[in-house]
Amino acid sequence: MGAGFDLVAVGEGEATAVALASALIRGRDPRELPGLAFLSQGRLASNGPGERRPLDDFPAFNARARKWNALEITRGCIYACSFCQTPFMFKARFRHRSIANVRAHVARMRESGTVRYVRFLTPTCLSYGSADASTNLDAVEALLAAVREELPEGKIYFGTFPSECRPEHVTPAALRILEKYVDNDQLVIGGQSGSDRVLRATHRGHSVEEVRRAVHACIEAGFVPDVDFLLGLPGETPEDRALSIAFARELVEVGARIHSHAFMPLPGTPLASAAPEPIEEPARVALEQLESRGALHGQWRAQQRVAQDLVALRSSRDRG
């Protein structure tokens, strides 16, 4: 509000935006609406989060203006990793866009004559169609088959940005489905750490060994695994980071690529008020060595700077 905004949407904004437009047209006070926050006598007031609706209720892009983007097929995430905003913004449960709705979107893209590929937005692509930690590979295949029917000459990118695969979901059965339909030769795998202690502390829900198995399965199936690592997590020790570096080197030697990240305290997460652990000299040098070989990429330096700025801003705010 201090930046000059009169109203701010809280939570999901689709239903809130429609209600806000209707209220303004009718001359109603929008501060009465759910899903909005505003200043009242200098203090923040909120009407609570906006309504959560099925994804099919709202389009995934502006087809009339031909503004195409990745199709959001899943919102929310049951895993509730402590550093991630997704489950805390959208609830720790899955909501999936229906196959029929996805197919209709892809048909609009094809009919435009300007789209040659489709990407998907999801926190965990092989969770499509599932309500829990299990996979529903029949639903995944039905989704990809429908997209392929609508876009026979186009390319399908699934399991790569802006989606990823949880390591425990990367099985030979899942990879056979991906081999059949997708055009990407890389799969993004959320590994995050080479320390089982850190994985447990951040509620990742998988082990280091499951990451290792996923990487080997990808390589055997002909995919290049692009494995996310997140360093500097609160409570991470130098020993934990050494385990991560050693694990990253192990995965590179068998054919993986490493996507490096540094922890940033994101608003709304359990670690929002936590400070990052420093990525000390041995770990920094190891990351740079992997970078020089082309085996590691990512914005970990910039993310370190952002994290330091966030901590400084919070400290300044707390001092008044």
Image (cartoon, grey):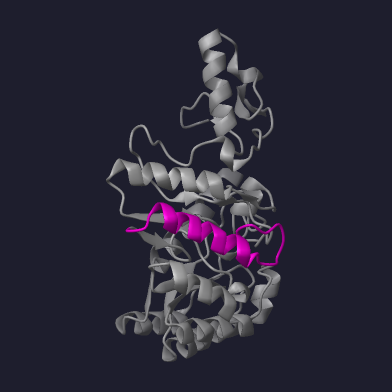
Percent of width and height locating residue 231: 52, 72
Count of numbered circles on the image:
0
Q: Position of residue 55 (x, y in %)?
A: 58, 42
- Residue 175 vertical placement versus 139 (above, below): below
Q: Is residue 29 above or below residue 156?
A: above
Residue at horizontal 66%, vertical 68%? Answer: 202
Q: Residue at x 55, y 9 (%)?
A: 26
Stretch of the chain drawn in magenta: 127-153
Q: Is residue 39 above or below residue 182?
A: above
Q: Quadrant of the C terminus?
A: top right
Name the residue: 62% across, 46% down: 89
Instruction: Judge from the rendering whether residue 154 lies leftward or rightward of residue 4; answer left or right.
Output: left
Residue 7 appears in the picture as rendered: no
Q: Is residue 167 visible?
A: yes
Q: Is residue 64 left or right of residue 274?
A: left
Q: Is residue 186 magenta?
A: no
Q: Quadrant of residue 303?
A: bottom left
